[in-house]
Image (cartoon, rainbow, N blue to C red):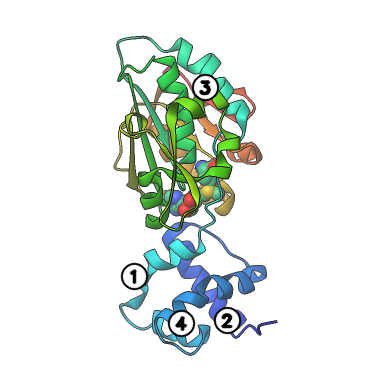
Amino acid sequence: MHDIDLTPDLHQRFCAALTRASGIRLGENKRTLVETRLRKRVQELGLADTTAYMGWVFQRDNLAAEMPVIINLLTTNKTDFFREPAHYEYLRTRVLPAHLGGETFTFWSAASATGEEAYSAAMLMAEHFHGAPAYTILGSDISQNVLSRARKGVYYANQLRDIPAHLAAKYTVPGKNAKGHEVFRITADLREHVRFSPMNLMLDSYPVYRGFHAVFLRNVLIYFDEAVQRQVIGRIVNHIRPGGYLFVGHSETMQVRDPRLIQCASAIYRKEQG
Ligand SMILES: C[S@@+](CC[C@H](N)C(=O)[O-])C[C@H]1O[C@@H](n2cnc3c(N)ncnc32)[C@H](O)[C@@H]1O
């Protein structure tokens, strides 16, 4: 087993910097994880060990420039197509049918990771609107790495099992990647409806549209402390139109106490009509 050279003090200082930049909290029990995830970066920079890396990071001016790399390495980007399927069922059977025609349906996946969430929703909207250009989707995340993967819309073939077969047949194209692995790509038509853009939920105000019909903010609040969770929810709700919907992860419902929201199903809230 590899010894950890990262001391508790340095770990704490490093994690405090990460929390300030991203809201993500990593406790003392994540010291091995931090060291493991940083190892390749330490080698890339030709440094002796994580302690040397921390010395370099905390030198004047290095921290800000290095932070996007740190965020790429330390965010947990686990996601799946149609994860927490009850949410997609609600979107398909309740939210979309109630939408008035003639107006573009606007959807935001606010911690999109590699894009599976945004493309899953896109498939349901393409079905609902029968291919008409009546919907638009924004995916955003703090990690630049995941966003460049999301924009490509290429996934390993084993992820196909998460997509209902009739949707996979219509909205994915099989192929092989440069290494010869079986992959599939989201069709160009569907990709055209989805835009990915970097955005940090810690910003004081969000530079995005203010009238979304539905926002997915799922499995990201868990990384923040309670005060940050409240602030993030408050800011997100500012971007939902009256009568629009907020979906959070099923394990995150306790955090939602914004007075403008009314719960309508498990981990699904509606903004009051105003
Ligand atoms: C576990 S994934 C969740 C993906 C997807 N929403 C889902 O439920 O499957 C959490 C994502 O939140 C992103 N994230 C963490 N902190 C963030 C922040 N401050 N601003 C925006 N995105 C953040 C991470 O980069 C990661 O991709």
Please name the residue that numbered disc 1 is placed on. Answer: 64
Determine which of the numbered discs, if any, sits on residue 9 in the image: 2
Local packing at callout 1 (Cα closer than 10 Å; few below 14, some 14-19, many 20+) is few
Q: Secondary structure at mark 1?
A: helix
Local packing at callout 2 (Cα closer than 10 Å; few below 14, some 14-19, many 20+) is few
Residue type at mark 1?
Ala
Local packing at callout 4 (Cα closer than 10 Å; few below 14, some 14-19, many 20+) is few
Please name the residue that numbered disc 4 is placed on. Answer: 43
Measured as percent of width and height from the top left, residue 169 is found at: 49, 27
Q: Nearer the viewer, mark 3 or mark 4?
A: 4
Determine which of the numbered discs, if any, sits on residue 36 in the image: none
Please name the residue shown 37% across and 71% down the image: 66
Please name the residue shown 35% across and 18% down the image: 131
Q: Is residue 35 above or below residue 75?
A: below
Determine which of the numbered discs, if any, sits on residue 91 in the image: 3
Residue type at mark 4?
Gln
